[in-house]
Image (tube, coloured by chain):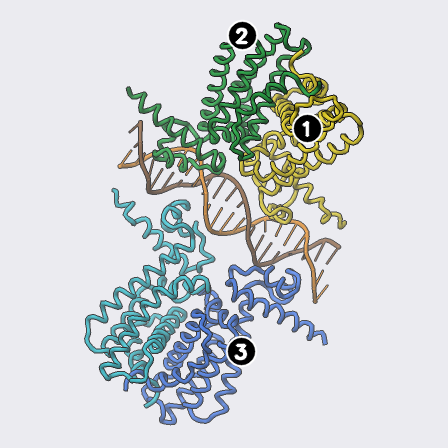
Chain colours: A yellow, B green, C blue, D cyan, E orange, F brown
Amino acid sequence: MARNSDGTKREAILDAAVVEIARHGYYQTTVAMIARRAGVADGTIYLYFSNKEEILFSLFESAMGRFILEGRSQVDQVATATEKLGRIVELHLTLVGKDRDLAIISQVELRHSLHFMDQISRNQVGEYLAIISQVVVQGVEEGTFRKDLDPVFAAKAIFGVLDEMATDWVLSRKNKRLESQAKSVVDFLLGGLSI
Amino acid sequence: MARNSDGTKREAILDAAVVEIARHGYYQTTVAMIARRAGVADGTIYLYFSNKEEILFSLFESAMGRFILEGRSQVDQVATATEKLGRIVELHLTLVGKDRDLAIISQVELRHSLHFMDQISRNQVGEYLAIISQVVVQGVEEGTFRKDLDPVFAAKAIFGVLDEMATDWVLSRKNKRLESQAKSVVDFLLGGLSI
Amino acid sequence: MARNSDGTKREAILDAAVVEIARHGYYQTTVAMIARRAGVADGTIYLYFSNKEEILFSLFESAMGRFILEGRSQVDQVATATEKLGRIVELHLTLVGKDRDLAIISQVELRHSLHFMDQISRNQVGEYLAIISQVVVQGVEEGTFRKDLDPVFAAKAIFGVLDEMATDWVLSRKNKRLESQAKSVVDFLLGGLSI
Amino acid sequence: MARNSDGTKREAILDAAVVEIARHGYYQTTVAMIARRAGVADGTIYLYFSNKEEILFSLFESAMGRFILEGRSQVDQVATATEKLGRIVELHLTLVGKDRDLAIISQVELRHSLHFMDQISRNQVGEYLAIISQVVVQGVEEGTFRKDLDPVFAAKAIFGVLDEMATDWVLSRKNKRLESQAKSVVDFLLGGLSI
DNA sequence: CATGAATGAGAATTCATTCAT
DNA sequence: CATGAATGAATTCTCATTCAT
């Protein structure tokens, strides 16, 4: 079967990396551990990734890629800013909540150093934030959101709330589904604290 | 007092650790680097900390300690929940914004592994969150905050927004003062997105 | 003739090896580098050579083979020992000076380990030395060279001078042609230092 | 005993390196092998040398240092160029012949790559050649050596002969003492081949 | 014959920690 | 208390070689 060289092996490595890194942390995970779980030789890792860090980068990219791709898709499926916000919140919590291992990676491991955050922050996270801020812009234009909002600031605030919920869910090992918080989050974001 | 010299040296080590870890990241910072900057021998570190990780724990504790201590103090200085919220926001952003190195530690390095987050998260962060949630409870009782708010949830959301602002400030190397965001943050938290 | 394609590919590999090894040194040259330059797959190398070291052996053999073959031929073209010596000197310096990459191989890389020198030294170099020593014998018989010379010793001394000139030329990247030294070398070898 | 930090350990490492490298070749010698023979931990090597290659450099430097130092001393002890030449030849062969392991290093291992030769060739070897060429200059001035000699060229030729004798002795495992060749070498160098 | 993906043994180097002084 | 030389386990990455296609 020639399917091997298609990327199957690359994905096996990434899948193994998610599990091992989520379980032991990036620095406590050795390349050998990833290789063993992926069922390949240590050296094989280096046919697909130039070094250990690149595995983490790839993990991040594919994770963020999904957020951005599906985020755009969800936003396009409804008309109003309020509905769009709802979709984003739901998507975010659902994606994070779907796979605890991946969630651990995105909420904890990917933030393990400034050096690393630097590399990624300004690219893909920025794109994701842009999607959110466009929703805010629309809301203001529609007249449903407050005129005095800075859309970029608001997007960060929204992201902050989502991210905290996600981190909290990862750290508290409750079985409660993360998505179940979606309504509360949207309510809070729309209405704030005040009456 | 012999304690004086003890405290001094211990603090020199912690100060050195903040700088080195902020600059290079926890794993790229060697004990020797910290020792050199602190002006002590490598071995001396182990007279004050049982291992490298404990330095990070201590860093976290003293940082969070300040948040909690000053948080309580600020909250006690004003009467209404709205004012208290304002004080917390201002304090949080001010403390983070005061020292970039310390901010890097708290926003990035302290989150470097689930194992580590586990150890700390549910203790001190929980205490900090409790302060915030008490403010929310008060606001609800006062009638200024929405009745349907879950105070614990709201506290997390508030923390999420603050944390995201802090992280964003650390990652974007702008010179703009972090505290300058306090008003926007309070506005957003109180009023939400909707008109 | 199938041998044609065999020889061609084998030679392509050897040619590639000369360039890569001269440029990076034997140990810094990977089989993959040689394969890439030769335009063949890594595995193909092993159809022509049983291992990496054998490539170096083959390089040596073909290089020394030329010295011996042409050395004999040059020696046969003239009558007196003095003339023969001149031919050998000129040939040696010309062959080395013709191709810097090959010169690097022969003057530096081929000497990279006792183990390797052992394998080759006593065979082909010995044959080359034999040619030289026969010239010395003839010179003594002719009465032009000193009677008290040990021909084997003299051959080594002659080779030493030639070898040093060659090495010096390789290491000093001057463009001066190596052959231009031939006259000085012959003069020195014949007359020595003394008046 | 504080003698340890004096350089005793450093020397133990160098001594061990000579034996191991002579026996197995530079690339076949692992740092662990050197450490074991030196009776230190692997990591200790790196307290004295920044990497494996530096061990080789140090080996070379201390070896050449002796040639230069003793070479100068020998040359100063006699008056005429002929005598000085004799001293150099004897010293060279004696030093090489004294320790076969060190001889293997200097005659074989130190020449293992152009990169390496480059680093060292132009410094210390040049100094050694300068000593020889000064002797030649003196000989010409004295009127004992031929006027038409280029001293630099002659020095290289002399070195070439000495070097070849040394290499030959290393490769042929005869027990014959290398110094016994001194007289023949001087004779050859002074008188050349011709009658 | 030719390929090149896969292997896995092996090696240099780092660094937290210890302990004799 | 303080030192810093020494340790040696642990890890990443390389690369000669193989073999199924």
| Placement of the N terminus of chain C among the 4 image quadrants | bottom right
Question: How packed is label 3: few (under 14 Cα within 10 Å), some, or many (20 or more)?
Answer: some
Badge 2: chain ID: B
Three-letter amino acid code at the position of disc 3: Gly
Count of all numbered marks drawn on residues in the image: 3
Q: Residue at x 40, y 88 (%)?
A: C137
Q: Nearer the viewer, mark 2 or mark 1?
A: 2
Q: Nearer the viewer, mark 3 or mark 2?
A: 2
Q: Residue at x 57, y 23 (%)?
A: B162
Question: How packed is label 1: few (under 14 Cα within 10 Å), some, or many (20 or more)?
Answer: many
| Placement of the C terminus of chain C among the 4 image quadrants | bottom left
Instruction: Answer above or below: position of A19 versus A172.
Output: below
Left/right of residue C57 with respect to residue B157 in the rendered view: left
Look at the image and tell me whether residue D177 can be seen: no
Instruction: Answer above or below: position of D11 versus B66.
Output: below
Q: Nearer the viewer, residue C192 or B35?
A: B35
Badge 3: chain ID: C
* Residue hosting label 3: C65
Three-letter amino acid code at the position of disc 1: Val
In terms of secondary structure, where does tag 3 sit? Answer: helix
* Residue hosting label 2: B79
Q: Nearer the viewer, residue C182 or C21?
A: C182
For the residues marked 3 and 2, what is the alpha-carbon distance in whole angstroms? 99 Å
Q: Nearer the viewer, residue C182 or C135?
A: C182
